[in-house]
Amino acid sequence: MAALREAPSAPVRHDWTRAEIEALFDLPFTELLHRAASVHRIHFDPAEVQVSTLLSVKTGGCPEDCAYCPQAQRYHTGVEATKLMSTDEVLEKARAARAAGASRFCMGAAWRSPKDRDIPKVAAMIREVKALGLETCATLGMLRADQAATLREAGLDYYNHNLDTAPEFYGEIIHTREYQDRLDTLEHVRDAGMKTCCGGIVGMGETRAQRAGLLQALANLPAHPDSVPINRLVKVAGTPLAETAELDPFEFVRMIAVARIMMPRSMVRLSAGRETMSDELQALCFAAGANSIFYGEKLLTTANPEAEADLALFRRLGLRPMQVVEEARTVHADIVAPAAGTCAA
Ligand code: SF4
C-alpha cells in the first residue's frame, strides 16, 4: 500500500473546466468508480475511514435563510434556540471527547457571523480546549480577517465554512448572504494560517451540471479544502426544501467519486444524510473514495448505538477507523459541530 501511495499520479489541480467535470459525471458508473478508487489508493489506505462527530455549542435561532436548515429561526422546525455554552460546559464535553479517543474538538454555533463580543468567549474555549492537548476546529459563520486572526492566535487549527452549492444555483437556496461572502471567509481563514473544511449539499433540486459546478468551485479554490463534506439533503418539515424530490442514490455516489478524483488529497466526508443511507449505498460511497464519516452527537454520551452500528458496518466491509492521517491531520474521532444539514456538516 505504501508503494501505491508513492505512485506519481493524481496531481492536485486548480484549473478544472466545467466540461471536464461533466465528462467525469457522464462516465459509465463502473468506469467512474474504477477511476475514483484508483486515485483514492494513491494518497490513502482505502481500508481506513476517518470518524467524526458533531457538537453544537450554540443551536438554532439563526437569522440566515438557508432553505435546507432546521436551525434557521424563520422556519418552524421545532428546533429550540440555545445560548452559547459556557467554557466550563464545553470543557466537560471536550474532556469526554478526549476520553472517548478524540484528538480534535470542534465548536459549532448557528450564527450568521460571530459578534465581536462573542469572539473572546470562543477564543477562551479554543485556548482551554487546546490546553487539553486536542486539536481545535470551529464553525461560526462568516469571519472577518481580524476575527480569523484572533481565533488562530487563540489556537484554532481548522475552520468549517461550506460553499453549499454551485454559484449559479446558490440564489435558489440562500438569500441572506452572497457566494462571495463565503469565498471571502475562506480566504480570511487561509490567510490566518488555518486549515479549511468546506463542501456542500446535494439533492436540493440542483442539476447534475450544478453539482459539477459545486465541485469546480471547491477544487479551484487557491487550496483544496483539507476536508470536503458532501451532504445529502435531510428533508426537514418546516423548511422550504421539505418536499424536494429524492436524488438518485447512484448520482450521490457519482458526486463522491468525482470529488475524490478532483481533490485527491482531501478527506471526502459522508456527512448529513448518512443516517438514511443503506449499508449498501455507504459501501458504494467508500468504494468511490469517501474516507470520512460523521457519527452525530452521541460520541460524547455513554450510549452510542449509532457508533456501534457504524463499527459493525466497518467490520463487515473490512474497514477500520483512521488513527493517524498524513500531513499532521491526526484524527481518531473528530468532534465537530452542529446538527442536521448545517454549516458544519
Ligand atoms: S446553515 Fe448555518 S447559516 Fe444557514 S441557517 Fe443554518 S445555522 Fe444559519
Image (cartoon, helix red, strand yellow):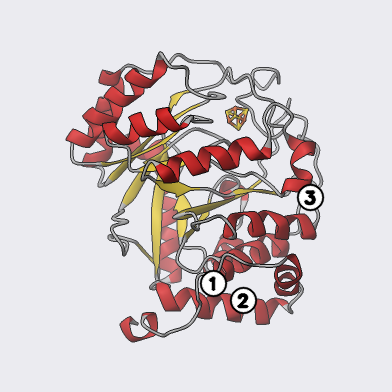
SS at mark 1 in the image:
helix
Secondary structure beneath label 2? helix
1 or 3: mark nearer the eye: 3
Q: Which residue is mark 1?
A: 287
Q: Is residue 227 above or below residue 78?
A: below
Of the residues under marks 1 and 3, which one precedes in the sequence?
Answer: 3
Q: Is residue 196 above or below residue 120?
A: below
Image coordinates of residue 256 in percent, x first then y, are: 60, 63
The structure residue drawn at horizontal position 28% and vertical position 33%, both measured from the top left corner, is: 153
Badge 2 density bin: few <14, some 14–19, many ≥20, Cα 10 Å: many
Picture quarter with the N terminus:
bottom left
Say few, some or many: other residues with alpha carbon within 10 Å of mark 1 (under 14 / 14 to 19 / 20 or more): many
Q: Position of residue 315 (x, y in %)?
A: 39, 66
Residue with the mark numbered 2: 33
Residue type, mark 3 in image: Glu
- Between the residue at mark 3 and the residue at mark 2, the CA separation in whole angstroms equals 22 Å
Residue drawn 33% across the image and 18% down it? 121
Would you say the residues marked 1 and 3 are in contact, meaning their CB atoms lie under 8 Å apart? Answer: no
What is the quadrant of residue 131 in the picture?
top left
Residue 138 image point, x, y percent: 41, 35
| Along the line of sight, the residue nearer the viewer: 179 or 161 | 179
Seen at 72% across and 62% down, the residue is: 251
- Residue at image coords 67%, 22%: 77
Determine whether the residue tagged by mark 3 lies in a helix, strand or loop: loop
Which of discs 3 and 2 lies nearer the camera? The answer is 3
Q: Are marks 2 and 1 in contact (CB under 8 Å)?
A: yes
Tags 3 and 2 in contact by the CB under 8 Å rule? no
Task: Say whether disc 2 or disc 1 marks the residue closer to the N-terminus.
Answer: 2
| Numbered circle sitting on residue 206 | 3
Question: Is residue 33 shown left or right of residue 134?
Answer: right
Depth check: 219 or 324 in front? 219
